[in-house]
Structure formats: C-alpha cells, structure tokens
C-alpha cells in the first residue's frame, strides 16, 4: 500500500531522536505517501471524495465546489472535467506532503514554516500549491463523535491502535507493568484494534503484527491480566461509547499522519496522552493538541507510567471537548479551507475570514441548489457529501457536475 520508499521512514517509528540534518529528515518524511494513484487498481474501492463545499450557481454567480481526496490525480484522469467544477485538496493520509501534481492545494497537517520553505525550494514544479495546515481542524463529525451518557467511567485507559511497530504498543505494555509495580494498581486497559484479533487465528495476521503481539506477551507474561482486546468496533455506533467510558485515551506512535484517536477522544471529552516526540519533525513548533486537553510524556515507559498517574489523579483539570471545539471540528475545518482560496474570499458576497460557515449567501445558495442547508450538507445529510469507491464517485460526479456558468 502507498507509493514511495517506506523503508526510509522506519527509523522514525521507534527512535526519539534522529541525528541528521533537518533537510534530510524532511526528505525522508516525504519519501512515502499513502495516496492512491493510477497503478494501484486494487485500492480503487477505497478512494474517497469528501465534499467541503458543493459547486454553486446562485444569483448569476458560479462558485466552484471544493473537495479533498487521497486520489486527486486519479480522479482528474478519470473525470477530466472535474477541475472545471471543483477545486481540489490532496491528502497524503500520512505525515508527508502529498505527491499529487494536479491538486490545487495540499493538506500539510501542521503549520511548519521551516518545512514549507524547504518544500517550495526542493520541489519548484509544485511550489505554487496552496498549503493548508489542518492540525487544528479536522473532518470528524463532532456531534456523532460526542460524549455518550454513561453512569461510570469504568475504563482507566483506552488505546485505539493496530498491532503495528508504528504504534509502539510494547512501550505502552511496559508502562502498564511499571504502573502496577510502582503504584500498586492494575489499570483496566482496553485496546481497540481494527483487525479481527483472535489468539486462535493470530497466525492469519501479518508476521509484523504477530511479532508485536509476541513482544507484548514477553513483557507482560499474562497480557490479558493487563489488557482487554476488542476488535472491529463500529465507528459511530460503538466507538464514542468506549471513549466516553474511558478516563484516559493513550497513543503510542511518534510518526504517522493525523492520528484520529486523539481528536475522537477529545471530541468525546476524554483527555489524551501521547509522546512529546509525536510527529516532531513534521510539526516543528506547532502543538499536538489544545492546552488542558491532555498531557505529554517522554518517549520511555517509566515516563509514560508517571504521566498516566498524574493524569488519573487530576482528571477534573481537563476540559478536552471544550478546548477541542474552540479550534477543531468540521465548522473550523470548513472556515480554514475556504479562507485559503482567493476565489472564495474575493467573490462570495459578504465573505469574512474565519466565518465562512456563517455566510448567509453560501447558506442560501446551497439551499437553492440542493434543497439542504449549509450545515446539513457539511455534516453529511446529503448523499453527495462523502462518496467512496472510484466507480461510485464516477457515477455520482458525472450526474452532478452540470452546475456551470
């Protein structure tokens, strides 16, 4: 899966400090992308088309739509007329800058001026791309991924992860063991995995995943005394309940893309813990999450155990959902993305930076074109808001892109 030299990034998965010039580190980060290109036909069913703003024709004014996808180049080849109707934002689904040649803009995760300067200098053919840092905004549905009514937070620690070396689960296992020894308590910990985890069929997992489980078993000896594993949890029906039942959500990776468990947990009002080194080179000086939403640990198991203890002793000091919604969620995402496009802030009547979501003209235009409010479109009440699979996208878009001047 993905394109590029994945091996160049492996040294960053489990090492807190890389002793290389920053320019070489940036090159390593950009050496692999999880975008889907034309040669990866086996992944065409996973192609996403997420519409931020649909194309509009209202009061004699045509406004292009705006979408993001991990497959912009592929979509532009299959649907050459797409760029006449939509602006596009490429998403690498990773910490790399996207590789797309035809996208109008890139999601870059973080506001990192040093890396942005390096990118524009290193790739002059793509230097004119709009770069949109979205670390402080995202596209999860904050009204569905929200606190659920629970009588008791009966889970001490929740981790949503995979049995992958990227996620550093053995360090979390060591931290749980140290915590039990140092603080004389076994924490009730739940690990939610996407794979269908069953010890009877663990041989069906990849050798890489099997090795991670072997490491965890060697550390804990009796791993199920420490960790309960739950697999294949329904995203909007069950996952918010697990977050809501949990006192802390923990994450072990130090290099990947935008880890969704952090934002999901905060949206469900559950404080988070991750390592200070998370995406450190991609991030620069940008923060990981808003203040008073969680704690950061050094990249070692004892520090993680102590950070867990501090957090569990001070749960009332955290206000993750409040702080999360000040800076993140779909409305902020919508405002940020539109603010980067001259065509929007210069042409949409009464447009104000940072307030596109409240623009009355946009709301009326969407209602006139699609018989739905801007809010309802943005939050997925239209079947055209989010489409998956190249065949489905092709059929839908071909019927749709008729709103042109």
Image (tube, rainbow, N blue to C red):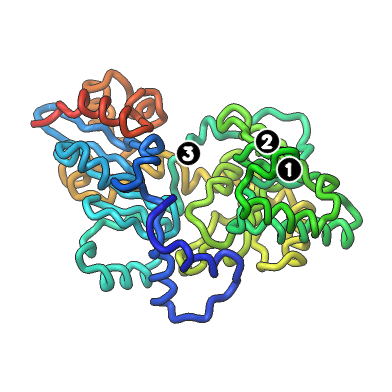
> Tag 1 or tag 2, which sits nearer the N-term?
1
Residue 10 placement, left or right of 116: right
> Tag 1 or tag 3, which sits nearer the N-term?
3
State how far apart marks 2 and 1 are (Cα). Answer: 9 Å
Vertical order, 106 against 232 (above or below): below
Say whether residue 294 is visible. Answer: no
State how far apart marks 3 and 1 are (Cα). Answer: 22 Å
**Residue 252 position by quadrant:** bottom right
**Residue 199 position by quadrant:** top right
Q: Residues within 10 Å of mark 3 (few under 14, many from 20)?
A: some
Secondary structure under tag 1 reads strand
- Residue drawn at (77%, 60%), measured in percent from left and top? 175
Say whether residue 391 is visible. Answer: yes
Q: Residue furthest front?
A: 203
- Residue drawn at (89%, 60%), measured in percent from left and top? 181
In this figure, which residue is indicated by the disc labeled 3? 140
- Residues under numbered marks 3 and 1 in contact, where contact means CB atoms less than 8 Å apart: no
How far across and how far down the image is residue 233, in percent? 62, 33
Residue 216 placement, left or right of 101: right
Q: Residues within 10 Å of mark 2 (few under 14, many from 20)?
A: many
How far across and how far down the image is residue 333, in percent? 39, 44
**Residue 43 position by quadrant:** top left
> Tag 3 or tag 2, which sits nearer the N-term?
3
| Front of the two marks 2 and 1 | 1
- Residue drawn at (70%, 68%), measured in percent from left and top? 300
In this figure, which residue is indicated by the disc labeled 1? 190
Taking depth in this image into account, of 358 and 370 the one nearest to the observer is: 370
| Front of the two marks 3 and 1 | 1
Secondary structure under tag 2 reads helix
How far across and how far down the image is residue 2, in percent? 41, 52
In this figure, which residue is indicated by the disc labeled 2? 242
């Amino acid at each position: 899966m993905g394109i590029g030299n994945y091996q160049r990034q492996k040294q960053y998965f489990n090492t807190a400090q890389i002793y290389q010039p920053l320019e070489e580190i940036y090159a390593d980060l950009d050496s692999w992308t999880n975008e889907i290109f034309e040669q990866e036909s086996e992944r065409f069913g996973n192609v996403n088309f997420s519409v931020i703003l649909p194309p509009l024709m209202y009061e004699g004014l045509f406004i292009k739509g705006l979408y993001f996808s991990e497959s912009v180049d592929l979509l532009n080849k299959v649907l050459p007329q797409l760029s006449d109707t939509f602006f596009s934002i490429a998403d690498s689904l990773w910490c790399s800058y996207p590789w797309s040649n035809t996208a109008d803009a890139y999601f870059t995760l973080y506001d990192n001026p040093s890396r942005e300067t390096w990118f524009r200098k290193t790739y002059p053919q793509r230097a004119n791309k709009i770069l949109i840092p979205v670390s402080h905004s995202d596209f999860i549905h904050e009204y569905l991924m929200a606190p659920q009514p629970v009588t008791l937070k009966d889970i001490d620690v929740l981790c949503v992860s995979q049995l992958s070396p990227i996620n550093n689960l053995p360090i979390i296992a060591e931290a749980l063991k140290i915590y039990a020894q140092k603080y004389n308590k076994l924490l009730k910990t739940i690990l939610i995995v996407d794979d269908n985890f069953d010890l009877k069929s663990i041989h069906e997992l990849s050798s890489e995943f099997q090795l991670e489980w072997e490491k965890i078993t060697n550390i804990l000896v009796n791993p199920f005394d420490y960790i309960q594993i739950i697999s294949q949890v329904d995203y909007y029906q069950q996952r918010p309940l697990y977050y809501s039942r949990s006192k802390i959500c923990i994450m072990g990776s130090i290099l990947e893309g935008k880890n969704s468990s952090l934002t999901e947990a905060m949206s469900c009002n559950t404080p988070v813990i991750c390592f200070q080194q998370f995406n450190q080179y991609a991030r620069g000086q940008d923060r990981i999450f808003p203040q008073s939403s969680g704690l950061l640990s050094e990249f070692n198991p004892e520090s993680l155990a102590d950070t867990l203890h501090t957090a569990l002793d001070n749960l009332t000091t955290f206000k993750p959902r409040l702080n999360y919604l000040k800076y993140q969620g779909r409305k902020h995402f919508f405002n940020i993305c539109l603010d980067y496009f001259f065509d929007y802030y210069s042409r949409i009547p009464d447009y104000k930076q940072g307030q596109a979501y409240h623009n009355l003209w946009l709301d009326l235009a969407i209602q006139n074109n699609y018989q739905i409010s801007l809010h309802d479109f943005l939050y997925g009440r239209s079947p055209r808001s989010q489409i998956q699979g190249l065949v489905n996208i092709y059929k839908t878009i071909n019927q749709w892109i008729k709103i042109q001047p």
